[in-house]
Amino acid sequence: MSITCVIGLQWGDEGKGKIVDLLSRDSDYVVRYQGGSNAGHTVVLGKEKFVLHIIPSGILHPGVKCVIANGVVFDPRQFLGELDGLKKKGIRIKKNLYISDRAHLVFPYHKAIDGIRESRLGKKKIGTTGLGIGPCYSDKFARTGIRVIDLFNPALFKERLQVNLSEKNVVISAGGGKPLSTQDIYQQYLHYARQIKPYVTDTRLMLEDALRRKKRILLEGAQGSLLDIDFGTYPFVTSSNADACGISSGAGISARKIDKITGVLKAYATRVGEGPFPTELNDALGENLRRIGGEYGATTGRPRRCGWLDLVAAKYSAQLNDIDSIAITKLDVLSHLKKIKVAVAYKYNGKTIHEFPAAVEALARCRPVYRELPGWQADISGINRYNDLSVAARKYLDFISQHLGVPIGIVSVGAERKRFLIKR
């Protein structure tokens, strides 16, 4: 038995899609266990770029079974569009893609309410993707959600939909929106039900059976630990447990069965949306990182805020997830720099602190304490072996590893699938 989990250690966008794609080669199952279509996992195969929002990144490997588990909030419209896009690009989808019958469904009213809430918050907005993820999770925990399995009981589905819309339309109308039609949504989702039915199953039982047969399972986290609903920079977070804490409830797999947790860390820091970001660079250097790194949201297209690597935040995430190894991504983006800064502590109220504050108000007032390291100023994208990296590049990686107390296992040096190094 082998269960590995891939977790983001920052505010998402760490490059988890590439790492999952790489590890999928040695996996039998790849499982998404939280989040929804607000994810944007990118894999580059030659000149072809795949951006996966709800389908697991392992789908690009024909022999791998991909599972959208119960902890995901499932948007059938997004799923079917993504599925069609993959098929048009020659990706074969046969008996290798599954949807949990327990997953909660995203509806048009969730998206409408998401937009209204953000609009009303104005300057205090969270910065959501507007895809209805938060409102769907809210319904789940308010016990008013509608699950995939409910689509196959039309009478029950219609009854629950009517009850929900009677409430949601009040909110939508008050927010200046147009009330939604129960009948329109009902017919639309029954149409979706017919299309997704071949993929729907009890994924908990499927994974339990896979474990009995000693299959290799790879769990794909979405977003990042600093966006976790419990341990992230609340309220500027996502609506699910985007760390290892969400695995058991999101996939139905006991935490005792997980063998390895790999934390993905970008060689610098980025953030999309609102919220504190101590190492943010609001200058030409930050713009340069955005341009070279292609730092634009895979889901929204929004420009990402860029800054130096924050090891205070990364250490917090590494400890929270009890990671076994680190995968460093986008190291090549720093190759043009003479000097590279890394935050190793914060200054807060005149004191030096090494812990990541729980209150966002405190984090917003933290000023980074930097350690400056020499850059390597050489193109590393064509390097095939870890030991062929320059001394300066290896020292930068060693500094990260030593500070976090966790070994580095994988280093990505380019966007393409083949651009990675294994540290042995």
Image (cartoon, grey):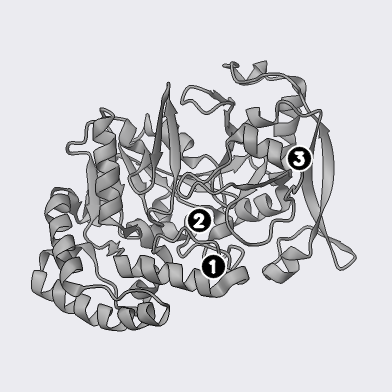
Residue 333 or 166: which is nearer the viewer? 166
Q: Which amino acid does label 3 sit on?
A: Ala
The residue at 65%/31% (across/down) is 333
Q: Is residue 353 above or below residue 219?
A: below
Q: Which amino acid does label 1 sit on?
A: Asp
The residue at 37%/65% (across/down) is 111
**Left or right: residue 363 compared with residue 227:** right
Q: Which residue position holds label 1?
A: 230
Q: Which residue position holds label 2?
A: 243
Image location (x, y in percent) of residue 168: 32, 79
Pointer 2 with pointer 1, Cβ within 8 A: no
The residue at 28%/37% (across/down) is 85
* In this view, the mark in front (3 or 1): 3
Q: What residue type is labelled 2?
A: Asp
Q: Which residue position holds label 3?
A: 284
Label 1 secondary element: loop
Work out whether mark 3 precedes mark 1 in sequence or the reverse, and give the earlier one.
1
* Viewer can see residue 322: yes
The residue at 37%/74% (across/down) is 177
Work out whether mark 2 precedes mark 1 in sequence or the reverse, and give the earlier one.
1
Label 2 secondary element: loop
Image location (x, y in percent) of residue 308: 73, 44
- Near mark 3 (Cα within 10 A), the count class, few <14, some 14-19 or many ≥20, is few
* Residue 97 numbered tag: none
Image location (x, y in percent) of residue 258: 42, 49
Q: Is residue 384 above or below residue 364?
A: above
